[in-house]
Amino acid sequence: MRDWFLDPPKRKQNRLRGYNYGRPGYYFITVCANARVEFFWEVSSMRSVGADIIRPFSPNLSQYGCFVEEAIQNIPRCYADAVVDKYVVMPNHVHMILSLTCRSGRMISAPTKAIPTIVGQMKRIVSKKAGFPIWQKGYHDHIIRDEMDYRRIWEYIDTNPAKWREDCYYEEGKRSMAKKEEKTNVMRILEQKNIPYTPHAYDPEAGLDGVSVAESLGQDPEMVFKTLVARGASGGLYVFDIPVGDSLDLKKAAKAVGEKSIAMLPQKELLPLTGYVHGGCSPVGMKKQYPTVFHETAEIMDTILVSAGKIGFQVELSPAALMELVGGAAADLTV
């Protein structure tokens, strides 16, 4: 039997062994988002993609997508010998054609590290601005051999947004087939604690706001709760669960947790502090169990729905069992 500690599995190398990645030439680069989460487009743009779309299609980039685009456009300013001939920011990955020249008379660091240096720096800049590791490890490259190869790749990049649903990185088909059987970490925690629940799946493309999710599930918005994270004046973090159609009253929330004031946690801090992304935040299974308060209406309901910890999934369960699990309290929290 293999000893995984003494002989761990080695990651597959994406670079061509022995190739000089500092030599002048053209390179087709693909970098994927962490877990292929669709960080980079606004949801409205993903809903706009279809067979009848008018080409060329120009998607609206999310805040993270804008970080990526800015970093790509800055590559030639940071590296005199690098030119971005063509690029596209897709929902969960980036394609670009990088060309290396010898205009400055010298190359970046050791010659073989030119492309890895450029791509690595771009990834670090975006992750720093996002506030969490937004990229998957490594990247994919293809050495462009001739003009025909270049034209084929240029055309692929140019039409990629309009053909998003045909893209190999588009995984809706896999997700929809697995939705009924897929279990999230929240579901596993509930099962470990012997807490009965009913799983629900919805299509994220119908909208990620809570009211849209409730409509997709055919549920009363008063029964569907959204999970919000805030920071108190003392620096402590707090979790508030309120009906999706309501707004959090910051003064009431501060009073409920004994703080002078609270402010909503910046979105970029959500993942590193809770382990969840915006649209998939759950009161169950956070990296750390923070003080949690539910809006008082939860106490009069037989069941409520909260996120299952992943976009596209909700769990329905007894609010009393949920509050006991997370050590939660109830209070008037809404405007």
Image (spheres, rainbow, N blue to C red):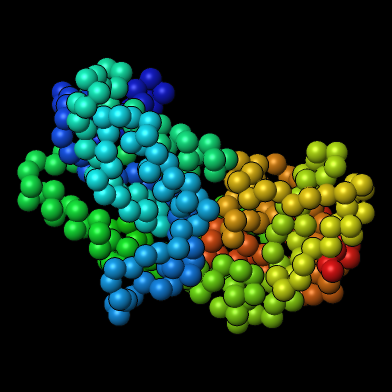
Left or right: 49 as drawn, with respect to 145: right
Quadrant hosting residue 219: bottom right
Q: Is residue 273 left or right of residue 139?
A: right
Does the image show residue 329? no
- The answer to which of 244 and 304 lies nearer the viewer is 244
Total labels drawn: 0
Q: Nearer the viewer, residue 334 or 10?
A: 334
Above or below: residue 151 compared with residue 128: below
- Give the image quarter of residue 155: bottom left
In the visual, does 121 lie left or right of 43?
left
The quarter of the picture where the N terminus appears is top left
**Residue drawn at the location 70% of the way across and 41% of the way down:** 288
Q: In the rendered image, which quarter contains the C terminus?
A: bottom right
Residue 230: percent from the left, percent from the top? 76, 50
x and y percentages locating residue 194 in the rendered image: 67, 58
Percent position of residue 203, x then y: 49, 72
Left or right, residue 275 beside residue 11: right
At a point 59% along the width and 73% down the height, the residue shown is 213
What residue is drawn where x is 32% and y is 39%?
Answer: 139
Residue 141 place in picture, x, y as percent: 23, 39
Residue 107 visible at all: yes
Which of the two residues, 271 or 155, is positioned nearer the viewer here? Answer: 155
> What residue is drawn where x is 13% and y is 53%?
151
